[in-house]
Amino acid sequence: MPKDLKLPFDPIARAGDLWRARWGEGSQAGPMVTATSIMRVQQVLLTEFDAIAGRHGLTFARYEALVLLAFSREGRLSMGRIGERLMVHPTSATNIVQRLAAQGFVERVANPRDRRGAFAVITDTGRAAMEATTADLERAEFGLGMLGDGEQEALFSLLRAVRVAAGDFVDDVDEPAREHPG
Amino acid sequence: MPKDLKLPFDPIARAGDLWRARWGEGSQAGPMVTATSIMRVQQVLLTEFDAIAGRHGLTFARYEALVLLAFSREGRLSMGRIGERLMVHPTSATNIVQRLAAQGFVERVANPRDRRGAFAVITDTGRAAMEATTADLERAEFGLGMLGDGEQEALFSLLRAVRVAAGDFVDDVDEPAREHPG
């Protein structure tokens, strides 16, 4: 992953110029550069978060699973629920939990209601790794310290429309708009 | 990947509430939910783009490599340059080109200036697959049709600040601000 390319031009804006030159003024150069920006910023953030989580023996994906378990009522969740909440494929959820179990950050216990299923339970060392990673992510302002509170709220709100359109949740118009917890 | 979860609440906003309840009002719940939104929207877009590219035998990553080659002056680039422009690890660039070569979408030719290096050259069938994918992505408005032009520009501009802070390019204050090609 290149770091600090410091190009003398914005590579995504330039790609937009090339796009318009090739496919015309009526082409979707605007949506193209915006979508490409989302992908690039996701890559920037994930690289930073993985590096932070890596200091505590985690990846960001495994950290997210630990947060989920720590936030759950009894510190345990079924594999299916973990995949659902993390919005990842069940196979990915299984891989994440297997890795966490190998590290001693979770334990797997039988699910009394489902013989084939299993619960993942967060351990004390898992909680410690999660808390330490959280402290470092908070210090790093989740990679978004260059944006003011109003800008973060605007970004959250614009992205929220994409999540609603994707069917992640129902945007209930009778409810007052959710506030950004900035 | 869950599609149309249609939860009766915004799962990311709820995670923000839990975050604040656990780590306090002074915690970085705002940046946390904004960063999480970026990751979720990237996942939504990539899933859609991979499905579109899949109709033409491609993934979005392989499509991006074909666009890069088609946009290059002679329809060919060195492996190193491909990795650099796609902002991916050289190993990923090699894997992408190997796969495209196996499909007949690119050909690999020796680099006269570097015996160990190689150029990737886009083939006619590669160009056809790229053009067909482009047409479908344009029709899908790059997954961002729910946002108006002004909203897309605002989103691009907010994300641009993150890319500048990451060192992707130098934001020359003497230059007039680049316009979003919306």
Image (tube, coloured by chain):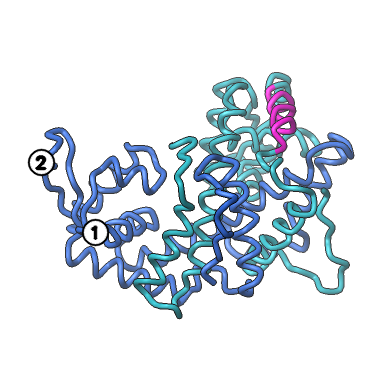
Chain colours: A blue, B cyan
Q: Quadrant of residue A72?
A: bottom left
Relative to residue A39, is residue A20 depicted above or below? above
Residue kind at label 2, given as amino acid type: Pro
Q: Which mark identifies residue A73? A: 1
- In-front residue for pair B45/B118: B45
Q: In the image, what residue occupies the spot 61% across and 46% down? A: A162
Q: In the image, what residue occupies the spot 55% across and 49% down? A: A172
Q: Which mark identifies residue A112? A: 2
In the rendered image, the quadrant that contains the N terminus of chain A is bottom right
Q: Main secondary structure of the magenta part?
A: helix
- In-front residue for pair B112/B14: B14
Q: Which residues are magenta?
A: B129-141
Q: Whole-percent x and y of residue A110?
A: 11, 43
Q: In the image, what residue occupies the spot 61% across and 73% down? A: A149
Relative to residue A16, is residue A139 depicted above or below? below
Residue kind at label 1, given as amino acid type: Arg
As drawn, is A117 to the left or to the right of A68?
left
Magenta stretch encompasses residue B134: yes
Chain to which the residue tagged by mark 2 belongs: A
Q: Which mark identifies residue A96? A: none
Q: Residue furthest bottom?
A: B26
Question: Which badge, 1 or 2, is on the more N-terminal residue?
Answer: 1
| Secondary structure type for disc 2 | loop
Magenta stretch encompasses residue A131: no
Q: Whole-percent x and y of residue A64?
A: 36, 57
Q: In the image, what residue occupies the spot 63% across and 74% down? A: A148
